[in-house]
Image (cartoon, coloured by chain):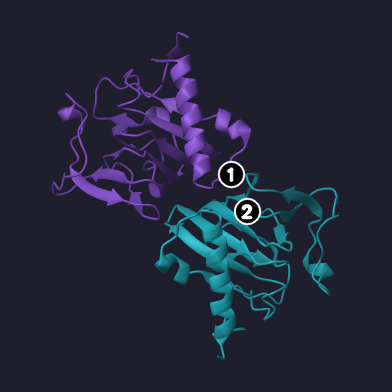
Chain colours: A cyan, B purple
Amino acid sequence: MITREQQKSARKHAAAMIRQTGIIITDAEAASIEVVDFGLSNLEKEGVQVLTLVQTDRISVKVLVMLPNQTEPEHWHPPVDDDPGKEETIRVIAGTVYFYVAGADSFREGFVVEGKTDCYTMRKEIVMQPGDQIILAPGEKHWFQAREGGAVMYSFSTIARDALDQFTDPDIVRKTKVGGK
Amino acid sequence: MITREQQKSARKHAAAMIRQTGIIITDAEAASIEVVDFGLSNLEKEGVQVLTLVQTDRISVKVLVMLPNQTEPEHWHPPVDDDPGKEETIRVIAGTVYFYVAGADSFREGFVVEGKTDCYTMRKEIVMQPGDQIILAPGEKHWFQAREGGAVMYSFSTIARDALDQFTDPDIVRKTKVGGK
């Protein structure tokens, strides 16, 4: 759960970071930014801000904003009916992103959220700068992290069904509850 | 046909326009910008510059650059085998774009390329500014135009098979020949 105040603050911060990159978004888009705590009530450490630009039955385009030192938990996109699962390209727009996928352990620059070693199992590290991109096939486990300055990324994908994403951390619930002041 | 000099110049102009919007692209990407004259050998009037960022079997992301007063000829994306045809979202990044689709004639701000009245049949005009976007269903005929300052747009779509696009102008060939100096 996050408070309304946290939601408002993270949304404002994310909109400013997006606009600082030169991307022009409407006020309605800024107001629609989803602040996601993955049900962990620890937004500053584990969370993401998501601006959905395009969402059709066939494709999805999102701008993902990572606040400073925020980590998006390890997850993957499973098959759904006839769909083999979401195929996603992440392209960094601003900031440095530490990206983790399957492969030989090369973990060096990032950090694992305290007490969550079992929830971050992919340890092949890819350090991504603006202009770098990576294609994730359906089912590929991945997680990523921003450092001091935060980061802004595009997610270009086939149809997104976020509610069906699967996470390594059993405590995660994709829907964020907003309550309190 | 365009000359190597025209290709080089249009590519350089397009890369500069993209970078001016704040989008960070690699030098390899800048060098890969496709300069398209649609076989009409009239690039300054009818053409487009295309930077492909993502091209998989499922989705495509391109940055389209219109040079000042350039027009992209009327075309549509037909079905191909099991695919109902390309679904495309155009989002304006910079500049003003005059966009034409099916509907009641509201043609006012744009112009039809001289002597080409029969090749530009869609006359419902949508004036698009940065942050505006439009979704084109498969098969929807469309054309668009930039004015003095040129324009930069994203094209987010399902798989692109440009060679199979269909055009109203029977003289169009999607592949651009480059020759001469």
Q: Which image quarter is the N terminus of chain B in? A: top left
Q: What residue sits 65% from the left and 44% below the top?
A: A132
Q: Chain of mark 1?
A: B
The alpha-carbon separation of the residues under discs 2 and 1 comes to 9 Å
Near mark 1 (Cα within 10 A), the count class, few <14, some 14-19 or many ≥20, is some
State the residue at coordinates (80%, 48%). Answer: A103
Residue A93, labelled with which disc?
none
- The residue beneath circle 2 is A94
- At a point 57% along the width and 77% down the height, the residue shown is A9
Q: Tell me if residue B141 comes above or below residue A26 in the rendering.
A: above
Decide: few, some or many residues near mark 2? Use Cα within 10 Å; few <14, some 14-19, many ≥20.
many
In the image, what residue type sits under mark 2? Ala
Q: Which residue is mark 1?
A: B24
- Judge if badges 2 and 1 mark residues of a common chain: no
Task: Note whether residue A138 is visible.
Answer: no
- B135 vs B54: above or below: below
Q: Are marks 2 and 1 in contact (CB under 8 Å)?
A: yes
The answer to whether one can see residue A125 in this image is yes
Give residue B49's position: percent from left, percent from top.
43, 31
Amino acid type at circle 1 is Ile
A140 or B124, which is in the foreground?
B124
